[in-house]
Image: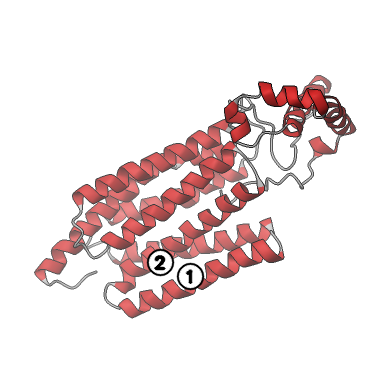
Amino acid sequence: TVGKTPVNVTLSSQGDKEPVYRDCVKQCVRTNCTGARLRGFQSAQPQYMALTGWTCRDDCRYECMWTTVGLYQAEGYRIPQFHGKWPFVRFLCFEEPASALASLLNGLACLIMLLRYRSMVPRQSPMFHTINAFSLVSLNAWFWSTVFHTRDTYLTEKMDYFCATAVLLYSIYLCCVRTLGLRRPGVSSMVGVLLILAFTSHVSFLTFVSFDYGYNMAANATIGMVNLLWWLCWCWQNRRTLPYWWKCGLVVLLLHGLALLELLDFPPMLWVLDAHAVWHLSTIPVHFLFYSFLIDDSLYLLNTEKMGVKVE
């Protein structure tokens, strides 16, 4: 979710600036969200909607959004955004069904491959615990991504963004441990401390100073580029000694290449599938290739350690 369009109800977009939309919301709230009408709404509202925090006002915004979209279509105008994002058809309590499903499937792919890794790689492998921790950080990020796309609130948005940054930073730590830390543990420890401080500073600034979407995107892009170049340098150095090096190189190139799908910002097809959902769907197979590399590399490290061979 690093490059996702900012989604905060305080943001204004063309659609929610329209007088017809604002008047519609005011009238709907005045008519349906007070007194007996409000109690009727609450008693008729499905439990799963109430549990995910959908209010009468939210329902008014949703209905008025589609009223406004219908007027735009009737006049032949381009579909507008509302409160910083495209209009999506709500499915049950899922605000962005395709992105929520894609996030869930990414999490399941990560979990499946983590279990496979644990079943194939002995705990004595030098990278076992670092990779296990990285997987847990990734699972946490995909959990919050699923929650955020299910229901966009102040808390879920922040957790989605912060957990995505945590994955990127831990990816650098994983790379550092593999490339330097096995021979120089002190180096990876210092890098780990610096990464924790960077994450703390990043979260503190966005929380207590300003939630600047441009800064957040630039910070994550920089972290991702460091990760990309570091792994690619390692792959190039070991291309003649490690037959599985190409898996790592392909994974990092795919992840950064697929992120460019975010640039294809278009109204959702069938009001469900937008560029962000396509990006999340496209990353699902990458988990299988990445963990295939991690398994091969962990077994290689275990064997070289047993034979007393210098780690590459």
Q: Is residue 255 above or below residue 82?
A: below
Quadrant for the C terminus, please. bottom left
Q: Is residue 230 above or below residue 287?
A: below
Is label 2 in a helix, a strand or a loop? helix
Is label 1 in a helix, a strand or a loop? helix
Residue that appears at 76% across and 33% down: 57
Residue at which label 2 appears: 173
Res. 159 mark: none
Residue that appears at 85% across and 25% down: 31
Amino acid type, callout 2: Tyr
Q: Residues within 10 Å of mark 2 (few under 14, many from 20)?
A: many
Q: Residues within 10 Å of mark 1 (few under 14, many from 20)?
A: some
Q: Is 27 situated left or right of 43 in this image? A: right
Amino acid type, callout 1: Leu
Residue 221 place in picture, x, y as percent: 56, 59
Residue 100 place in picture, x, y as percent: 53, 36
Residue 55 place in picture, x, y as percent: 71, 33
How far separated are the C-alphas under marks 1 and 2? Answer: 8 Å
Q: Is residue 94 above or below residue 178?
A: above
Residue 127 place in picture, x, y as percent: 27, 63
Q: Earlier in the sequence, mark 1 or mark 2?
A: 2
Residue that appears at 33% across and 46% down: 289
Q: Is 296 situated left or right of 105 in this image? A: left
Q: How many marks?
A: 2
Residue at which label 1 appears: 195
Could you say which is closer to the camera, residue 288 or residue 139?
A: 139
Residue that appears at 62% across and 66% down: 204
Inspect this view and state whether residue 273 appears. no
* Quarter-of-image position of residue 184: bottom left
Q: Is residue 86 above or below residue 224?
A: above
Whether the residues at callouts 1 and 2 have beta carbons within 8 Å, the answer is: yes
